[in-house]
Amino acid sequence: MGKNVLISGASIAGPALAYWLGRYGFAPTVVELAPALRGGGQAVDFRSETHLTVLEQMGVLAQLRRIQTGGTPMRFVDERGRQLLSLPAEFAGGDVEVPRGDLARVLYEHSLPHTEYLFGDSISGLTETTDGVQVTFRNSAPREFDLVIGADGLHSHVRRLTFGPEEKFVRHLGYYAATWQLPNYLNLERGSVGFNTPGRLASVGRDHRDAAKAGAFFLFAAPQLTYDRHDPAQQKALIGDAFAGLGWEVPRLLDSLRQAPEIYFDSISRADVRNWSKGRICLVGDAACGATIGGMGTGTGVVAGYVLAGELALAGGDHRAAFTRYENTMRAYAQGCQKGGDRTGKFLAPGTATGIRIRNGLLGRRALLNRMLKEGQKVSTLALPDYRSALIAASE
């Protein structure tokens, strides 16, 4: 097995995998459609010893602790701004919570010494040969790699080219979510405040770094919609239609949406791929087993990068054996984490007024909230292989 590995996607799983491959002597190349490293985004969290152990071994845990948010408390209010429910920071914050853009930057910087990055480009074709994979790009000249890894998220282009159309693997869970930045005109302190109507949530929270900025988070129930994922104007129109006529701060937040230069918009969905590899091509992170929100995909992607790189390093030239061991090690763990995403939309935006009242009433009871906090700490865990010791033993 050669050492030249192409990774599609420079968000989280891609740079994490590139870091470990570089440590084991591989030559990773990461191709990313965006013209530069993506900033912004919601806060993401790591939970459990499994996540923290991998971050510690990568040498990034201390750095992430220095930039962590400390968790994000949430308040829910009625149309007049009167508080209905307050949830503490630890309810959703995990062991370490950091802004997604900051995490991406840290992983990128740690992988950079041994990784080539191709921004503003994407894979247009994959042809597997006896000795490698011929890759054509949208902008760059064709190249050949020994292996290709799809770390390009729930809507993976590598998965589509290799395994088939998205609808075979991605299941819509009934909701759409959007985020964008705006001025902190409400002078919000730490945390977020949200307003529900049946099947809809409009919320806004202060930026973790800059008190003058805020981030909006909108979520709404809808059947699967047909739209262009690369057309922000079309996405803004869908959001505007879904929240038209609502009170509280919704009109002003929609005004900020129209002016926002960047927007994240996607369905809440999950991916389930029966086999994560085919020949010299393999999937990692959300491309293989992801959930848009609530499925701990960030932590799972970092762990998957550690496992896949370790198995490739141990494989002795047999990438098929490495891919099989990687999948056998990761699948049950990833699926256990993924289950949380199935409940996210219904929790944040219950479908009926009665559902909203029940959620608020139950979580307003301190004993039940404490029990849910304790249950939330019981996340899926994985006995991590010690690849460093195994490699040393194999070389003796």
Image (cartoon, rainbow, N blue to C red):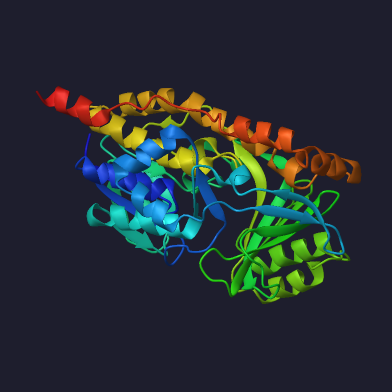
**Rendered position, 92 above or below 72:** above
**Rendered position, 238 above or below 135:** below
- Please state the horizontal and vertical placement of residue 167, each as a whole percent of the image: 64, 40
User: From the image, which quarter does the N terminus lie in?
Assistant: top left
Residue at 63%, 66% in the rendered image: 189
Q: Residue furthest left?
A: 396
**Rendered position, 57 above or below 44:** above
**Rendered position, 273 above or below 100:** above
User: From the image, which quarter does the C terminus lie in?
Assistant: top left
Residue at 61%, 45% in the rendered image: 92
- Please state the horizontal and vertical placement of residue 280, each as a whole percent of the image: 35, 35
Residue 383: image quadrant is top left
Q: Nearer the viewer, residue 20 or 294?
A: 294
Q: Does residue 227 appear left or right of residue 117 in this picture?
A: right
Q: Does residue 162 appear left or right of residue 309 in this picture?
A: right
Residue 213: image quadrant is bottom right
Q: Residue furthest front?
A: 366
Q: Nearer the viewer, residue 9 or 297?
A: 297
- Please state the horizontal and vertical placement of residue 115, each as a whole percent of the image: 27, 54
Q: Does residue 379 appear left or right of residue 304 in this picture?
A: right
Q: Does residue 327 appear left or right of residue 109 in this picture?
A: right
Residue 166: image quadrant is top right
Q: Nearer the viewer, residue 382 or 306?
A: 382
Residue at 76%, 61% in the rendered image: 238
Residue 174 can be seen in this image: no
